[in-house]
Amino acid sequence: CFLDQEAIVSQLVLGNGASIRSTVRLAKGANLIAGESPGGVKTWSAIGYDSPSTMIMHTGAIFSTAGHLWIGFKGVGQSVLFISGGTVNVAGQFGLGWNGGAGRVDLRGGQLNLAHIDSTQSIGATSVIEIESGRLSISGNYEAVIKDLISVGLVTTHSRDRTLIIAYDGSKTTVTAE
């Protein structure tokens, strides 16, 4: 699926029992809003609910969730959120491999803005956030949590010669690669 305009969906679920890999590509100008019904009820969305799926964010694209976002929620194979210049805004809980699946965020530019992560559940043992460039931002002070996730390899860089920089500015924690 290829999107280059604005779209609103009450729930985005990629890879829900599909026998083939689902892929959504958001191009410049795309603005996808997911997880809120017309009545205002907020719900979760998933990239790879129970089968592998991929979302690709290009420069100038925006993907926002009104609720939780699960990447590689359960099932086999790894689901991927590839951000090469777009912006992803998650208003609820964020989870990679939350329920036995495997998820990966490949941040190579742009921004991943999170409202919250759980210090023990948001990134499962077979999941990872890899930062090459761009910015990971989390509302609140998550410096200690990010340091712990880096120490066990759940947040990392693409190349070993780069260093992750963690900063808290009084309202949000940001992680970038030097």
Image (tube, rainbow, N blue to C red):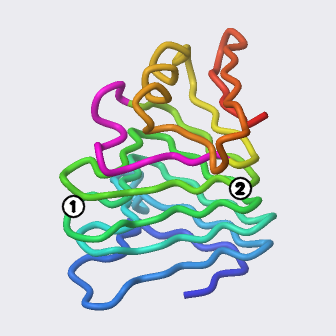
Q: Which residues are magenta?
A: 118-131
Q: Residue at x 77, y 59 (%)?
A: 85
Task: Between residue 64 and residue 123, name the one nearer to us.
Answer: 123
Q: Residues within 10 Å of mark 2 (few under 14, many from 20)?
A: many
Quadrant of the rendered image containing residue 169: top right
Relative to 33, is 147 above or below?
A: above
Relative to 146, is 129 above or below?
A: below
Farthest top residue in view = 170
- Please state, as top left, top right, bottom left or bottom right, where the N terminus lies in the image: bottom right
What residue type is disc 1 on?
Lys
- Lateral position of residue 129 relative to residue 79, left or right: right
Q: Residue at x 57, y 25 (%)?
A: 139
Q: Residue at x 38, y 39 (%)?
A: 93
Q: Position of residue 22 (x, y in %)?
A: 41, 83
Q: Residue at x 32, y 77 (%)?
A: 15
Alpha-carbon distance for marks 1 and 2? 25 Å
- Identify the residue under disc 1: 74
